[in-house]
Image (tube, grey):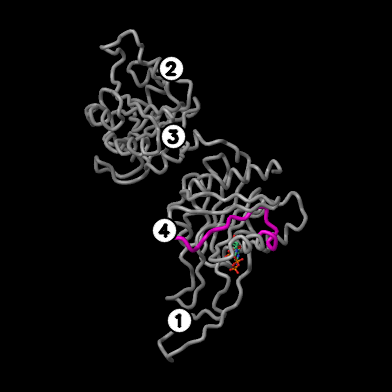
Amino acid sequence: MSFLTDKKILLGITGSIAAYKVADWLRALRREGAKVTVVMTESACRFINPLTMAALSGNPVHTGMFAAEAPETIPHINLAREHDLLLIAPASAQTIARLAHGLADNLLATVALASAGPIIVCPAMNSVMFQHPATQANLATIKSYGYLVLDPDNGKMACDEEGPGRLTDWENARQAILSVFAPQDLAGEHILITAGPTREALDPARFLSNPSTGKMGYALAATAKQRGAMVTLISGPTALTVPPGIKCIQVTSATEMHTQVMTCLETATIIVKAAAVADYRPAEPQLHKTKKGPASLALPLIANPDILKELGERRGESSDFPLLIGFAAESHDHLKEGARKLKEKNLDLIVINDLGGTDTGFATDTNRVTLLSRNGTQEDLPLLSKEETAHRIWEAVGRLRVGH
Ligand code: CTP
């Protein structure tokens, strides 16, 4: 279940060429269980047909201040009251100016004025219009009202100009929308998360690594941010996009990850080691590419630092050390191995991952994990998306915080 399930979202569309993009946003919102009603300005109706949005939302689209079929219903007041979030996307310069000045000269601006709930504004316009001091001042004004503004992306626009002004992408918008509905139980926490594999160089063309894609660690980072935390992600090489609002430090090897974790340790209140760290590295990495030679080759390896174990040792008996959460990737004796690592590495919680299944472990979008806590609790989670698994881990962290 998503935080969007059964949430009522009012989608305000204004006159920008990016209007066609939010047809996809609407479908994505509905896929996650949200109930969407659309309000369109007159100019928006020139860019995209209201019929498209009515069909995609499954609801009539509102365009005028006075509903011809039921004039007594006062649409702007009812629409404002009946929704959990007003999402204005794309927001044109004109609509942003209306919002900043409190104008109530069309349905969308009036609904915004009458709305007591959260409002997210996603500007999209020509980059010169966006950078104009008038637009910038209007954006600063609506931010001061508490509206959340999602900055547009840089890039080539429909008018052939290049610069800031492209509608933010759906993944950014989705994270912001989820943050509106997620419990803010991690507010005040500074969470350090490691993710992805490490690569241990043999020579300039080769390395030792593992199949980790970083999906679990990145899902933990995105969901922690949604729940109000400040997040630093230390990431090995992955193909993933860093979730919005997260500081990311890219590393390659286990020793680099070790250095960065120890540097960032000071300010952290929770540390989650989701990275699949290589236990060994080549003893003598070669400066030049190794040439083909004998039929067999022995490769001397030396141990990498066990970052989590070192954190556990540093913590000792201290009660003001960050909470320590580890992962255990196991192919057999899962519970026994997980319990051993929980104890040996002096952790508060360990997330035991089954490497055996096709829908769990490395590179999948789903996971089935068991959580073991220092207090002796065991929670077997069902098969869930990595995002849902991450939320369940944060709920377990919440219980640890209150001592259960
Ligand atoms: N870990 C770490 N540094 C290492 C190896 C592992 O910080 N050099 C962390 C991982 O990020 C994970 C936990 O320790 O949170 C357990 O990792 P895992 O690979 O399951 O176990 P290992 O301790 O490496 O033991 P083994 O490989 O023998 O199962």
Disc on res. 288: 1
Q: Nearer the viewer, mark 2 or mark 3?
A: 3
Report x, y in % for residue 178: 47, 37
Q: Is residue 172 above or below residue 87?
A: below
**Mark 1 belongs to which amino acid?**
His
- Asked if labels 1 and 3 touch by Cβ distance under 8 angstroms, the answer is no
Q: Is residue 128 above or below residue 310?
A: above
Q: Mark 1: few, some, or many residues within 10 Å (few <14, many ≥20)?
A: few
Residue pointed to by mark 3: 5
Which mark is first along the chain, 2 or 4? 2
- Asked if labels 3 and 2 touch by Cβ distance under 8 angstroms, the answer is no
Helix, strand or loop at label 4? It is loop
Left or right of 333: which side holds 214? left
Q: Residue, x 67% and y 45% (percent of image)? A: 400
Q: CA distance from mark 4 to mark 2?
A: 43 Å
* Magenta stretch, residue numbers: 342-358
- Asked if labels 3 and 4 touch by Cβ distance under 8 angstroms, the answer is no
Q: Is residue 128 above or below residue 116?
A: below
Residue pointed to by mark 2: 114
